[in-house]
Image (cartoon, rainbow, N blue to C red):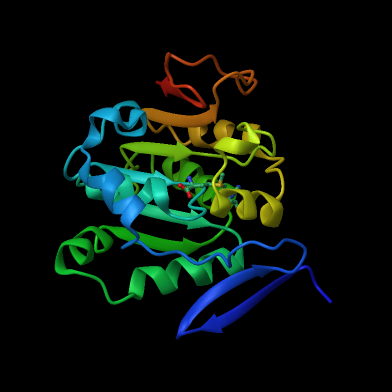
Amino acid sequence: MPRFRLIRQDAVYELIDTHQAQLALRIDFSAAKLQHRATRGGKKELLLRAVGAKPGLRVMDCTAGLGTDSFLLANAGCNVTMLERSKILSILLSDALRANVSNETQQILSRMHLLEADAKDVLLDMKRMGLLTEGQAEPLPDVIFIDPMFPSRRKQALVNGSMQMLQNFVGKDQDATELLALAMQTGCSKVVVKRPANAEALELYKPSYQYVAKANRFDVFLQ
Ligand SMILES: C[S@@+](CC[C@H](N)C(=O)[O-])C[C@H]1O[C@@H](n2cnc3c(N)ncnc32)[C@H](O)[C@@H]1O
């Protein structure tokens, strides 16, 4: 039997890890914890400071995952294109984006657009289009955001249940350096990479500056 199973429970898709006795993974943008984080205000969210989040900013989130970072960005008024290559996670995300939520949350969700795709393909297309049309192609996003998966990114106690399950499910993202290189090659003026606080920088590029928190760090690349 496969370790992970996608089931439909109360008309919502959930991912179950048959090897762990933990709650099923479902994405709920109305969850109290996320709503609290969103309404607590942006000041504490280094993500928002690193991205420079503001209404109308166009952000491409290359690693949508559970959609938490995308939601926080959309809550700050950004228009977010979410790329996720896992079919299962894309199903969970699109389910959550279609869910019956309050009007306020619905307004936030209307700024989040999901595409099931490998971000490398999308970035490569953006780079090619830019080269072909000498900058006249579709406007680039204002910011490209990348949050690759690192198995031991946080102390186990700090990794919440959903993120732990995501780690077990997707494993390590081996192509993070390639993703950063492609993002830079599109010519986008700002690329932000989320890393464990004490991790080495991804090779090839030196961050212009960093925002460092206890568990995470945001490397900002300007060009
Ligand atoms: C650490 S999680 C991202 C968590 C996310 N920032 C959040 O707030 O929930 C990394 C996710 O990025 C996805 N991913 C990694 N590389 C990708 C790529 N090249 N294209 C699309 N998705 C990718 C993985 O499948 C995984 O779901």
Residue found at x 40% / y 45%? 69
Residue that protrudes farthest toward the right in the picture: 1
Q: Give the vertical position of 207 relative to 77 (above or below).
A: above
| Corner quadrant of residue 40 | top left
Work out which quarter of the rendered image holds the N terminus and state it.
bottom right
> Front-most of 127 and 218?
218
Residue 30 against residue 69 in the figure, above or below: below
- Percent across and percent down for residue 125 are 51, 50
Q: Is 82 placed left or right of 117 in the picture?
A: left
Residue 37 spot, x, y in % from top left? 30, 44
Where residue 18 appears, as percent x and y from the top left, is 74, 69
**Residue 173 picture quarter:** top right
Look at 26% across and 46% down and name the residue there: 38
Q: Is residue 61 left or right of residue 72?
A: right
Given residues 136 and 153, the one toward you in this image is: 153
Q: Is residue 138 visible?
A: no
Q: The C terminus appears in which quarter of the rendering? A: top left
Looking at the picture, tell me which residue is in the foreground, 115 or 19. 19
**Rendered location of residue 106, percent (x, y):** 22, 66
Residue beneath the point at 62% across and 49% down:
164
Q: Is residue 117 left or right of residue 150?
A: left
Which residue does the image show at 39% across and 33% down from the upper left?
188
Front in this rendered view, residue 24 or 55: 24
